[in-house]
Amino acid sequence: MFRKFIFYIILSLFLTPFVYGQEEYMQMGVIETVRTKEYVTVFFNTTPDRDIYYIYSGDKIIGNISSIKDIPEISSKKRYLCNYTLLKDEYKAILRPGLDIVIILTDKEIDKELRKNIFTDTPDYKTAIISPIDKREMVLIPEGSFLMGCSYCNDDEYPEHSEFLGEYYIDKYEVSNSDYKKFADIKGRDYPDYWKDRVDKKGNFLSSYFASLPVIVTYYEAADYASWAGKRLPSEVEWEKAARSPESKEKMGQRTLYSWGNEFKNGIANTEEFWLSDKVGENLKKMIMEKYGLTKIEKGYIPVEMYEKEALSYYGVANLDGNALEWTGSWYKKYSGSDKVSNKYGEQYKVIKGGAYLLSKKDARVTSRKIGGMPNLYKDRIAGFRCVKSVSESDKK
């Protein structure tokens, strides 16, 4: 009995909030080991119930952990394998065992500078880059907070909540068939089955239009491409932040559900509504036909670089509300604070985000969550994708 009493006293000390500056944190665990490929193991004081926790070093947040996976116990402590993302590459030098894993208890700023509009401040990093391996344009998503989820939409989007992420880059466009072919040829990978009648005997595309459409692949095919390109698939949080406005631009319960605002607009995103008549999306359809020398376009995917400027996200990312569904690297789990129960939650399906040409405007909401991986993640060729990468010294202005 006395030992149990001492245990609870110690546990209460671990869970006591502490304040640094204007921010209040609660220590939830410590890093046990730092591993290769952006992994750490963590000892948690209690069973983790959030998607993201923060890494705290001395006087500041230096990154976050996600994709938290239980490791069989080797002692009385619970160990978890986690992906980590650092706010800056130079923080790798201070990432070490023993650093605190914390949650943020207040809605105050970690740093007032983090919440300023990226377009009114001078960022430390270039706002756009060309990634060196796959030669694709990427745009900067600045560090700061945004509102994620939706409290009045589908059950699995509940609750609306604040998330904080450091800077990262995301592909402006979805990966195209042409982009994927470069990877497949270099790495000796098989082409997707649906390309069968789209390439000649030499492996060249028969149509430049088809070459420019988003590639549709399995999760592992997408992850393989991302790894080859020196990137990774975005987490669900990273994907949604790229589609959202900063938290300072939104209010709880009044958030924008599409890249451009709260109300759907016909004709600026490739969803089911885009194909209701030739008049819907007439301007975008005309641009596509002129560029590719077509007299008519059939219902389906459109080239990844074709978009209405009005439909770009706040940060300048294209086709997040339609065209192709997109893989993320996140497991389909409930959000912290949700009491929804589903046998689909866990580490069996990956979250898919974004709308698609064959889905309605309801499915095009940037908060909408879909799943991929049936019968498994090696065979379910259901979605396209875009990649992300952390900022580096070479990306500085």
Image (tube, rainbow, N blue to C red):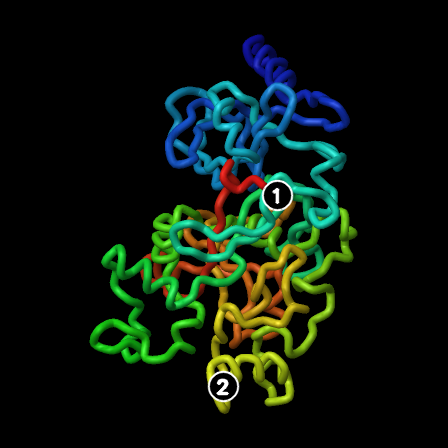
Amino acid carrying mark 1 in the image: Ser
Q: Is residue 293 visible?
A: yes
Place of residue 251 in the rendered image (x, y in percent of width and height, measured from the top left): 78, 52
Mark in front: 2 vs 1: 2
Q: Nearer the viewer, residue 369 or 138?
A: 138
The answer to whether residue 345 shows anywhere in this view is no
Give the vertical position of 87 relative to 223 (above or below): above
**Number of labelled discs?**
2
Q: Residue at x 56, y 59 (%)?
A: 369
Can you give x and y, in whole percent of width and height, for residue 231 in the image?
Answer: 43, 47
Q: Secondary structure at mark 1?
A: loop
Mark 2: give few (<14), some (14-19) or many (20+) Cα within 10 Å. some
Question: Is residue 161 positioned above or below 320 on the image?
Answer: above
User: Which numbered dot is residue 231?
Assistant: none
Residue 82, horizontal then vertical, whole percent: 46, 35
Q: In terms of image quadrants, where is residue 276? A: bottom right
Compared to residue 75, the image places residue 87 above or below, namely below
Residue for badge 1? 336
The mark nearer the N terminus, 2 or 1, is: 2
Instruction: Report whether 86 appears left or right of 106.
Output: left
Q: Quadrant of the N terminus?
A: top right
Q: In this view, which residue lies farthest toward the top?
A: 2
Which disc is residue 297 wearing? 2
Quadrant in the picture for residue 195: bottom left
Quadrant in the rendering for residue 62: top right
Tell me where residue 362 appears, x and y as whole percent: 63, 70
Residue sitting at the far left: 201
Residue 236 vertical placement versus 179 (above, below): above
In front of the other: 28 or 180: 180
Residue under the point 64% across and 55% down: 315
